[in-house]
Amino acid sequence: GACGGTGPGCGLFDSSEPATCQTCIKASCCSESSACGLDADCVALESCVELCHGDAACIASCKTEIPDGASLFDPLVACESANCPACE
């Protein structure tokens, strides 16, 4: 179904993500993505984490720097991990 996110894809997207990942987020994690995309702290945290390329210490540092973003970011990551293996 349609989702209330802004922009072309349901909230927040990194254009470097594969199309299969973006499609999956639209289908399975749209509410989480939209919620994050509307919250400045979540967007900032997501941008920080993207630059980490999966490095756990870097991600932890981002969460320390932008703690208010985690409440919306963590559910999005959990949803992607559970439903969208193309996003890994």
Image (cartoon, rainbow, N blue to C red):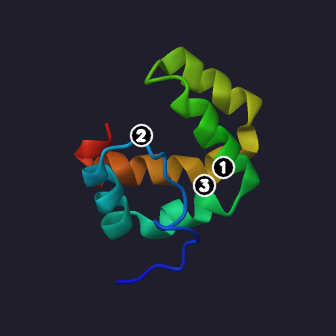
Q: Are marks 1 and 3 in contact (CB under 8 Å)?
A: yes
The mark that comes first in sequence, 1 or 3, is 1
Up the image or down, 30 lies above or below 86; here it is below
* 48 over 7 or under it: above or below: above
Q: Is residue 26 left or right of residue 33?
A: left
In the structure shown, which secondary structural element does the residue marked by tag 1 occupy?
A: helix
- The residue drawn where x is 65% and y is 48% is 43
Q: In the depicted view, which residue is nearer to us: 40 or 59?
A: 40
Kind of residue at badge 2: Ser
Distance from Cα at disc 1 to Cα at disc 3: 6 Å
Q: Residue at x 47, y 18 (%)?
A: 55
SS assignment at label 3: helix
Residue 5 occupies which quadrant of the picture?
Answer: bottom right
First in sequence: mark 2 vs mark 3? 2
The CA distance from mark 2 to mark 3 is: 21 Å
Name the residue tied to disc 3: 72
